[in-house]
Image (tube, grey):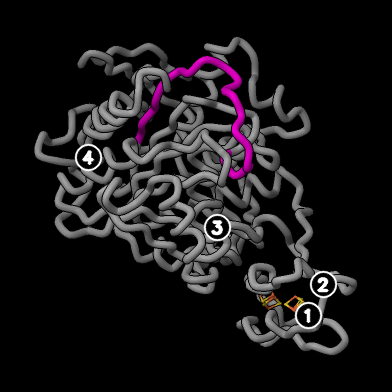
Amino acid sequence: MKSTVFFIPAKTAEGLSSLAQKTKRLLEALAPAGAGLKPAPANGPGFIKKDELIGIKTTFGERGNIGHLKPPIIRAAVEYVKAGGGKPFLIETNTLYVGQRSNAVDHILHAYSHGFTPEAVGAPIVIADGLRGENDYCMPLPEKVQEFKGSRVQRLTRTAFIAGGAKAASGFVFLSHVTGHMLTGLGATLKNIGMGLASRGGKLAMHSGVVPQILTDKCKACGLCAEFCPAGAITIKDYSIIDASKCIGCGECLAVCPHGAVKISWDEDTENLQKKVAEYCLAILKGKEKKSVFLNFIIHVTEQCDCMDKAYPPAFEDIGILASRDPVAVEQATVDLIMEHVREDFFRKAWPDIDYTTQIDYAHKIGLGNKEYELLDITKGLRKVVRSRQ
Ligand code: SF4
Ligand code: SF4
């Protein structure tokens, strides 16, 4: 059975209040699970129950970057959740690399500086993996080998380290800005879920199979990393020494070292990285599949992602916003729509060494969602099928 993807054409130039209004319309179009194509009840979203804690996941952007989705758009989702009786919060996690978003305090202050204040968006921010990434939940993915439509899939992740707050949330509204990405080729819904709600240890596991390394020429033997290491894996002599047999790969030493002496190998090949991202999506959405919705914004699309500290101009004309209850279908529809409008494979051209389709194909294979979809344009209240992918 095909999944449904709703679409509204949109352009940055039409202004934030128009984009927010369109976001609201798309959210309202997403019907409760099992309701087919019927609209959600007029008094609020059908999938949210009273007082449920619903995480709204976007990214606050890096300093100097202008591509991220802006607060009025996020506010539209906040109001949507409130209309359904839920309690919305903006959910984020610490970054693996050291910077403005690698601990909760700096991250929240940075978000405020980009306008994501509780007053502006109508909801608080929760950094779901704790102050420094220590709050993670170990989610086992028990079936190492999964049968799917007769094919056997060898999973790469046995235990996913997901942000504790993501585990505790009742459901999610994912608002993803579509961009290229230096490691995965495409950064949109799947990356926003899988990488975005992994704890620091999860991010480390996805990016690298190995323990961090100490750059002995930079290490000042200050002992801070040993103090924070939750596994007692670090001893300090002339420099910090990590016991690989004890290290659980949480990445905390990387975050706390004030001298840049802890290095991780960004050595996972892109195919495995994309597969792990999809597996993390599975872990994060487990039990919340019917309580989560996914929106992709094809506006101000750039080759680089919003984690870069530069303002990049859009690579092509804005297309619009897509919404679905199926994270795979919305991703597939996004790349198809871009291909149709730009008349070339934008992501492949931007990152020729990366096959970005791996993440979508693999997510489909492991049962995260459907690559077959119907695209419905709801412009002006009309619903018409403009695409039906086989
Ligand atoms: S925190 Fe950094 S400088 Fe200090 S001991 Fe650890 S690695 Fe060395
Ligand atoms: S050495 Fe300790 S702090 Fe660093 S990644 Fe391993 S367990 Fe975490």
* CA gap, disc 1 and disc 3: 25 Å
Asked whether residue 94 appears in the rendered view, the answer is yes
| SS at mark 4 in the image | loop
The answer to which of marks 4 and 3 sits earlier in the sequence is 4
Tell me the mark number nearer the camera, choosing from 3 and 2.
Answer: 3
Assess mark 4: CB under 8 A from ligand 2? no
Which of marks 1 and 4 precedes in the sequence?
4
Q: Where is residue 120 in the image (x, y as percent from the top left)?
A: 29, 46
Residue named by callout 1: 242
The residues tagged by marks 2 and 1 sit, at their Cα atoms, a distance apart of 8 Å
Q: Which of marks 2 and 1 is in front?
A: 2
Looking at the rendering, the stretch of residues picked out in magenta corresponds to 306-324
Q: Does the residue labelled 2 lie within 8 Å of ligand 1?
A: yes
Q: Name the residue under label 2.
A: 214
Measure the alpha-carbon separation of dots 4 and 3: 35 Å
The answer to whether 134 is drawn above or below residue 284 in the figure is: below
Left or right placement of residue 241 versus residue 324 in this view? right
| Lower sequence index among marks 3 and 2 | 3
